[in-house]
Amino acid sequence: MTLTKGGLTTLGLLALTGFAGFSASITQACTRAVYLGKEGMVVTGRTMDWAEDMHSNIWLFPRGMKRDGGFDEASVKWTSKYGSIVTSVYESASADGMNEKGLVANLLYLAESDYELPGDQRPSLMISAWAQYFLDNFATVKEAVEDAKKEAYRIVTTEAPNGAKGTVHLSISDPTGDSAIFEYVKGKLVIHHSRDFQVMTNSPVFDEQIALNKYWEQIGGTVMLPGTNRAADRFARASFYVNACKQSADPHEAVACALSVMRNVSVPIGISTPNQPNISSTLWRTASNQKNLVYFFESTLSPSLVWIRLKELDFSEAAGVRKLVLAGRPELGGDQTRGFEKAAPFKFLAPEKK
């Protein structure tokens, strides 16, 4: 395991070209950025870019849920300490969400991810349950990092229903603005932990993204910013705009600013770039107001925002699992705090047992 705080890798000409380490078989790209406003206002925004509809819905998971890592009898087991709101993908993974303490988790694609160590016999945790594990168990980034440093489990990956490899990295943030990014590189866990790490996109690994971004910081965003949809370019634009836009204590302005940054790094519908696997159309965006505990969801097919006020939700064990159906409902908009209905929880995606 490697812990970093601001370390850079020299990339020479790579910084000039914006090379992003593309792999030829994946069609997912996302961006995440943390807005740090005044008077403790923190909003985490993200885009979900993918090559097809993932039938996403929003789920309410209560405290007291008996969980396991989703792979086999040796999977890590836990009972959820905190309730959470998550956006699902393919009704088989928690891709994005916020818990009742304001901890936010976001899964983004990373081609360089490699989780396997020969002979690893630690309890397993399916990658589809990775974000949920953090939301269920921790109130702060510091707590989550301390747990991850124990390396008590191994990550097991699988293909998405469309055949895309399940290679992702995970970002978390909390109401203090603290952030951490978790990557598995050559089988080893790498943790980047700092309030400075506001932005995450896709390839290359995070150390190299920081180095690429240094080049654009030297030029200055008021002079020129890279304008393509490539991961390194989106990283540079999000890093500049999330701090250049109005820094406000007003929750309406703060969320509007965070979403405006996410729209700036979004990919138009129908974009298909040959041999550029980190570029896919943006399907939806979220913004999590971690000070006031309000979760916003915006579908690119909808003219309206959906929002949910976590302080008004019942996360008790007795309340059970509930679901807000978004798939097939582009007309849905406004405050949907009361729009949840009881539902059986989805199963985390796992490889077929042989």
Image: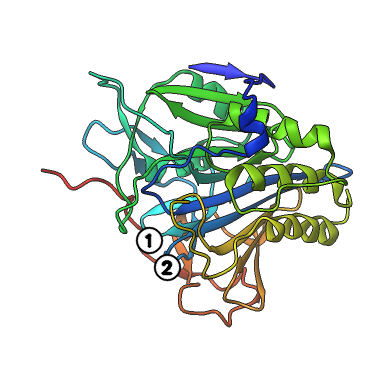
Of residues 206 and 10, the one nearer the viewer is: 10
Q: Residues within 10 Å of mark 1 (few under 14, many from 20)?
A: some
Q: CA distance from mark 2 to mark 1?
A: 6 Å
Determine the image quadrant of residue 233: top right
Q: Residue at x 51, y 70 (%)?
A: 270
Residue for badge 1: 90
Q: Which residue is located at x 66 percent, y 79 percent? A: 303
Residue at position x 25%, y 21% from top? 121
Question: From the viewer's perspective, is residue 156 above or below residue 228?
Answer: above
| Residue 215 drawn above or below residue 242 | above
Look at label 2 and name its amino acid. Answer: His
Residue appearing at x 30%, y 48% in the figure:
159
Residue in front for this viewpoint, 308 or 159: 159
Please say if 264 is above or below 118.
Answer: below
111 vs 329, nearest the viewer: 111
Rendered location of residue 4, percent (x, y): 62, 19
Q: Earlier along the polypeptide chain: callout 2 or callout 1?
A: 2
Q: Which quadrant holds the C terminus?
A: top left
Q: Position of residue 184 (x, y in %)?
A: 44, 28
Q: Position of residue 326 (x, y in %)?
A: 50, 72
* SS for callout 1: loop
Name the residue carrying label 2. 55
Seen from this angle, which residue lies furthest left? 354
Work out whether residue 150 or residue 37 is closer to the camera in this orientation and state it.
37
Callout 2: SS = loop
**For the residue marked with disc 1, what is the amino acid?**
Tyr
Q: Is residue 102 visible?
A: no
Q: Is residue 145 visible?
A: yes
From the top left corner, tell me how far across and down residue 64 is, in percent: 44, 45
Q: Are marks 2 and 1 in contact (CB under 8 Å)?
A: yes
